[in-house]
Image (spheres, grey):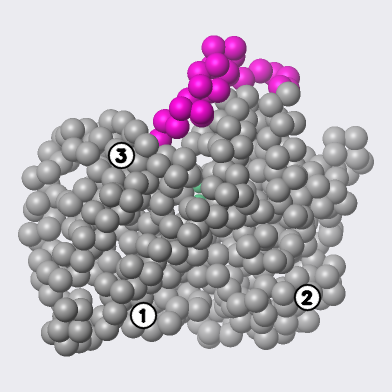
Amino acid sequence: MVSNLATRHEGDDFYASLKARADEIEGRYRELSPISARLSEEAKAFEPGGYTRDAVRRKPYTLYIEKGEGSVLTDSDGRRIVDMWFNSTALPLGHGDPRVVAVVNAQVAKGTAFFARTESEIELARIICDRLPSAERVRFANSGSEAVMLALRIARGFTERDLVIKFEGCYHGSYDDVLWSVGPPKEKFGPAESPTPVAATAGLPAGLGRTLVLPFNDLSALERAMASHRDELAGVIMEPMANRMGLIVPSQEFLEGARRLCDDHGAVLIFDEVIAFRLGFHGAQGFVGVDPDLTAMGKVIGGGFPVGAIAGREEVMSVTDPDRVGRVAHFGTFNANPVTMAAGKATMEALTPDVFEHLNARGAGVRRRLEELCDGLPLRITGAGSLFKVNATSHEITDYRSSLTRDAAWERIASLALLNEGFMLTSGLHGTIGTSTTDGQLDAFLSAFEAVIRS
Ligand SMILES: Cc1ncc(COP(=O)(O)O)c(C=O)c1O
């Protein structure tokens, strides 16, 4: 059955047949979501272009959601949709998990934030230090972007150097110093071994001298760059699983090489585990077996509430100690607010080693079943743990440039077609499962996916 399909849809023809139906699929989307369409128009009167969060943007418009229960969203038009991205992976237990709701309600009744501290902050910090192999001290923030910002400030404060290395195609949030070469166009990105830093947004200060961009997964390029910037380098920031590129875990050689090079050069190795933390009970660093000096976290550890955290070795983190002369400062009205701390603690406690094992085994099962459906087609399944991505390419993806072989338009239309069938993934077909995702929902998703690739 699948091989007939493969013969029919070799190469570009395969992508063309779904893309030819783009208007019909978009028309159906509009039919199914008139209230979201109206709200999207209304929003434009108050928010530029009608948006306040670029990542959720979808063409022709993004759905408005009324509520989420477990793995099911209800949109403003009353349609029920299976959530397969859970606010960018932030809700491993799904929406409204009773254990989280109970502690959050109790905390809201007691007060939501104080100009002082609460014991809950120590409790969540203790859990993070117990689980993350490299974490001895923690500081909380309100988003992954803030965590990344503080991690870079700590690296610079600790080393008293300026330059930071990031990798082409990696997204680390909304902080200026990492908004370089996040998704640069081919005509601007320069040579593969020494990419030209390309601003990911207008409005960046002249930052070229402070952030060096290198190819992901290329140890020799990293070796060369570190040798030529010996005494300038504060740190290297990397995703141990690069999300936007296609949930790509770099080679062990690259990860271990980066660790060794940072040690040799006295630079701070920073893992951005804002998404990758959910790879296992001991975070992504436990999953790949390499310890960074600092880890930036967010999403999962806040149990669905705004959160960020920076954890790391005591020696490095101690530059933020308020008693230290020449310290690295860190502020934030809502840092470690007790509602987030309570939700985060309840979520982390629910994510036991057994739960991670089960979730990851089910994730592997979904990837395997997707691979079977895509056998012989120009579609590749990537991902790890409880995460997966369908890539419209027949090439192996190892870095940003190989990820550009994807037919992004096909992915976007396939994602919209799946949304019409009641399954919400990203526009780039990233998906994840949570503990609330049922086997029935997964079976239904796989049938809907099969119907999309057959159309
Ligand atoms: C790898 C990575 N780092 C940092 C961030 C920024 O986190 P936040 O959106 O909480 O600021 C994100 C957000 O998706 C991310 O995926």
Instruction: Identify which residue is drawn at 14% across, 50% down.
Output: 29
Q: Seen in the image, is 418 located left or right of residue 22?
A: right
- Choose the circle earlier in sequence order: 3 or 1: 3
Q: Which of marks 1 and 2 precedes in the sequence?
A: 2
Residue occupied by mark 1: 405
Label 3 vs label 2: CA separation?
A: 45 Å
- Distance between the alpha carbons at the discs numbered 3 and 1: 33 Å
Callout 1: helix, strand or loop? loop
Q: Is residue 126 above or below residue 236?
A: above
Task: Give the residue at mark 2.
Answer: 261
139 horizontally vs 345: left or right: right
Q: Which residues are magenta?
A: 95-118
Residue 283 in the figure: left or right of residue 25? right
The residue lying at 84 percent from left, 59 percent from top is: 159
Residue type pointed to by label 3? Val
What is the secondary structure assignment of the residue under circle 3?
A: strand
Mark 1 residue type: Thr
- Image quadrant in which the C terminus is located: bottom left
Q: Is mark 2 within 8 Å of ligand 1?
A: no
Q: Which residue is mark 3?
A: 72
Query: Which residue lies most toward the top here?
Result: 109
Residue type beneath disc 2: Leu
Q: Measure how far apart labels 2 and 1 are at the Cα level.
A: 31 Å
The residue closer to the viewer here, 157 or 377, is: 377
